Amino acid sequence: MNLRMQATLLEDGRLHLNDGPIDLIVLAEGDRRSREFAFAAAIARFSTMLDELCAELPLLRSQSRSDATAPSGIVARHMHAASLSVADDKFITPMAAVAGAVADEILSRMLRAAPLRRAYVNNGGDIALYLSGDATLTIGVVDVPEAPSIFGVSALDASHSVGGVATSGWRGRSFSLGIADAVTALAANAAQADAAATLIANAVDLPGQAAIIRAPANEIDPQSDLGDRLVTRSVGALSENDVACALASGEDEARRLIGCGAIVAASLRLCGVTRVVGSLAARSPGAERRPASAGAMLHGLEERKWRRTFASL
């Protein structure tokens, strides 16, 4: 029995699950019996998840390579596959997909347990989601993760085939090799969105720029999967040209990931400027198309796209 785990039904009907560093908010919409079965399945699966991941940490902190030993756990294998699917020749470890993979696994167990109209698992802003019929989910967009204020929203429905939303950046809870305030990626599942957001955020960068302070990751956290790679600690004043150059690099990476089918769209934010790549094209005949204007530079409240996210009921 896992005595660390906490499971609490919130006043709004959502489920809160916590075990050490993993903190989830879970929504399940359906009839009363379906909700009960879905939440029971989520709790049962969550109870062993942290221990399973800890058992394979050395492998999960190693660079993702096709010739590397594959992990054995279900979530660990999902992390490994998601990171490999976006890696190309870039450095990434399965840990880049951990939050999304955990959310995906909990959601999949819920959907196996009961028929639901709408569901999501929010793991610190990395969200696995399910929409059926005419169900929608509004994704709130905020400007700065540590002092969130909404500057835009985007409504998803089943026709978009988006099953995961994830955000990465140097201001977030994980280290970043780049300088993006945040990158939000939309993909078929949360693990793939998580890994892709990490690589795009790493690509938004200005190597050698004196205004950027970096430090070896393992000097800040000896257990970091990034080893002695330099991670961003602060970003000073940048010129408009600097911002444009850094975002252009990130856009190139986002386009690569869209081209290989890893993501649907991405929003890149740096110093108050946003670039959006890809589109939320409706997949069903007659459904509304929501273009994202690849390469467009947007500002302020006009952006109405994706950044550091939460799911709004």
Image (tube, helix red, strand yellow):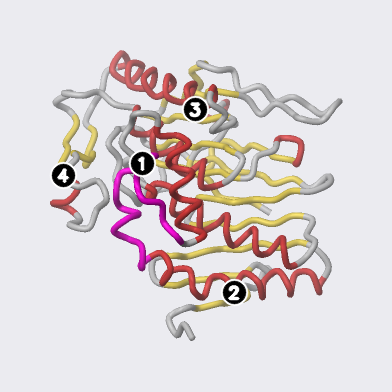
The CA span between labels 1 and 3 is 21 Å
Residue denoted by label 3: 257
Provide the residue span drawn in magenta.
54-72
Residue denoted by label 1: 67
**Residue placed most toward the observer, 173 or 152:** 173
The CA span between labels 1 and 2 is 35 Å
On residue 43, the disc is: 2
Residue at 47% over, 78% down: 5
Type of the residue with mark 1: Asp
| x and y percentages locating residue 68 in the rendered image | 34, 45
On residue 228, the disc is: 4
Is tag 1's residue or tag 2's residue first in the polypeptide sequence? Answer: 2
Residue at 41% over, 56% down: 71
Q: Residues within 10 Å of mark 4 (few under 14, many from 20)?
A: some
Q: Are marks 4 and 3 in contact (CB under 8 Å)?
A: no
Could you tell me which quadrant the C terminus lies in? bottom right
Q: Residues within 10 Å of mark 1 (few under 14, many from 20)?
A: few
Residue at 61% over, 23% down: 292
Type of the residue with mark 2: Ile
